Amino acid sequence: MEDSLITFGLNLQKRVGKPMHLRFNENTSTMVSISRVEGVTRVSLHKMFAQAPEDVLHHLVRYVQGKQKSPGPVIRDFIEENYQRLDYSARIRPSQLFVEGSYYNLRDVYDTVNKEYFDGGVDLNITWYGRLRTSPRQRVTFGLYYDPLRLIKVHKLLDSPLVPRFFIEYIVYHEMLHHVLPGYTGSDGRRCVHHPEFQSREAGFKYFEQAKQWIRDNEILLFG
């Protein structure tokens, strides 16, 4: 890998044709960033670009040179395709995962959903996150999915005897779907996360309507 990074870096520098400081990263979010300081272009690229084909390299050179204002669809498509392959789950230590809540064990919930809807074939990490108390009217995100970390996070606000298990199962199911059915960038350049196939599968959750109704009926309970 190191040899390919060096080769790629030298090739990019040559084609850009002006002073450039290149750094490779292993980020989980920003895959390419460019800044210009005192005549020097500073470029941070994810290591995935070492394997970039010619068309991607061509557009990357133009972007670094300032000939195009944004990465453009070719680079975005390349990032999207390779983003799905990233696996940084080994970075997570078991001690960083908190599955045992006061009322619900997330691993138990996850295993139930995994067995019933995915034949036990989805291997992800899961943990509680956030604070048990929120400020009045403060909105929280019940569930989050971090793809490169293969990590689902469920807000601690749901670890309550007032929250039915089927609602937590729904949140976990929803986040697992983000792994099974990843989003994509449409022809208009917009990111589509809850695409038609996702919505169809989501509606297949057996307590889908009950979960939607429960949150409508209990907004005051959760958010004050």
Image (cartoon, rainbow, N blue to C red):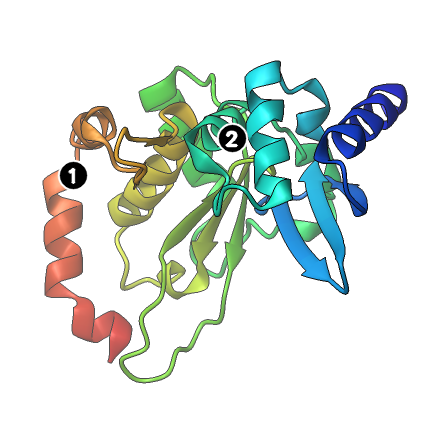
The x and y percentages for residue 188 are 26, 35
Q: Which of marks 1 and 2 is in front?
A: 2
The x and y percentages for residue 103 are 43, 57
Left or right: residue 111 versus residue 25 is left
Q: Could you classify mark 1 by the number of other residues whose Cα lies within 10 Å: few (under 14), some (14-19), or many (20 or more)? A: some
Residue drawn where x is 39% and y is 51% of the image? 143
Q: What residue type is labelled 2?
A: Ile
Is residue 26 positioned above or below 49 on the image?
below
Looking at this view, is 146 or 37 the one in front? 37
Is residue 214 positioned above or below 60 on the image?
below
Kindly state the secondary structure of the residue where label 1 is placed.
Answer: helix
Tell me the distance, in whole angstroms, between the alpha carbons under discs 1 and 2: 37 Å
Left or right: residue 70 versus residue 192 is right
Point out the image quarter for the N terminus.
Answer: top right
Left or right: residue 170 versus residue 33 is left
Q: Mark 2 points at which residue?
A: 75
Residue drawn where x is 79% and y is 24% of the image? 11
Instruction: Say the numbered circle drawn on residue 208.
Output: 1
The x and y percentages for residue 75 are 51, 30
